[in-house]
Amino acid sequence: MSSLDHPAIAKVAAALAEAGQQRAADGIRILPAEVRTAAQAAEALGIEVGAIANSLVFRAVFADRAAPLLSLTSGSHRADTGKLAELAGASAVEKADPKFVKEHAGQVIGGVAPVGHPAPIETIVDTALEQYDVIWAAAGHAKSVFPTTFAELVKLTGGRAAEVGS
């Protein structure tokens, strides 16, 4: 599979290029096997697990609605749903089911990218990622990743930087 053979990867590449992140778009790498966890991605890339930006779509619950919340969390720890709820102003943040993730991200669990979604998603970027010169994020498919930096990730997503891990 070339990087643009899969529609979700092509959409991510286009979103990166449109955002002025051509280096990231050109850097999309197709791995030999699916990497559905940060540990698998880090092993495939030969890097520290903390340099993987785990893209996790949660279901943020508000008094009148539920909305997607994207947490770009360092692979070295877990996202704290209590912290995420506080940051989002939600009464709770819950694990999203595959249908909810696909509906809001346009991508499936294990390959959710920080960009390329049908509509903007509120995003929180883990400050633990800031310590790495290069961060790797999913590119729309469980076999695809792209390189970026903490600053580029915050700018690209319009996200907020915050401590989200436990």
Image: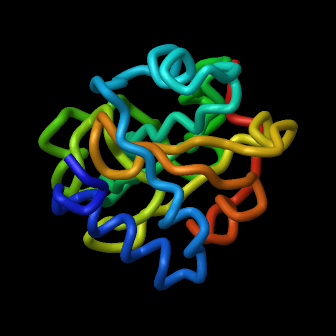
Does residue 78 sit above or below 150 in this rendering?
above
- What count of labels does the image hold? 0
- Res 13 quadrant in image: bottom left
x and y percentages locating residue 10 in the rendered image: 27, 66
Quadrant into which the C terminus falls: top right
Q: Is residue 61 above or below residue 65?
A: above
Pinpoint residue 9: horizontal percent, then vertical percent.
29, 58
The residue located at (45%, 54%) in the rendering is 28
Q: Is residue 32 above or below residue 112?
A: above
Residue drawn at the location 37% of the way across and 33% of the way down: 31
Residues 126 and 26: in front is 26
Left or right of 26: which side holds 21? right
Image quadrant where residue 49 sits: top right
In this orientation, which residue lies closer to the viewer: 96 or 141? 141
| Residue positioned 59% across, 74% down in the render | 21
Query: How was this image coloured?
Result: rainbow
**Is 67 on the left or on the right of 23, as rendered?**
left
Picture layout, residue 158 above or below residue 100: below
The residue lying toward the viewer, choosing from 97 and 62, is 97
| Residue 60 spot, x, y in % from top left | 41, 46
The furthest residue to the right: 131
Q: Residue at x 73, y 44 (%)?
A: 134
Residue 164 x %, y %: 68, 34
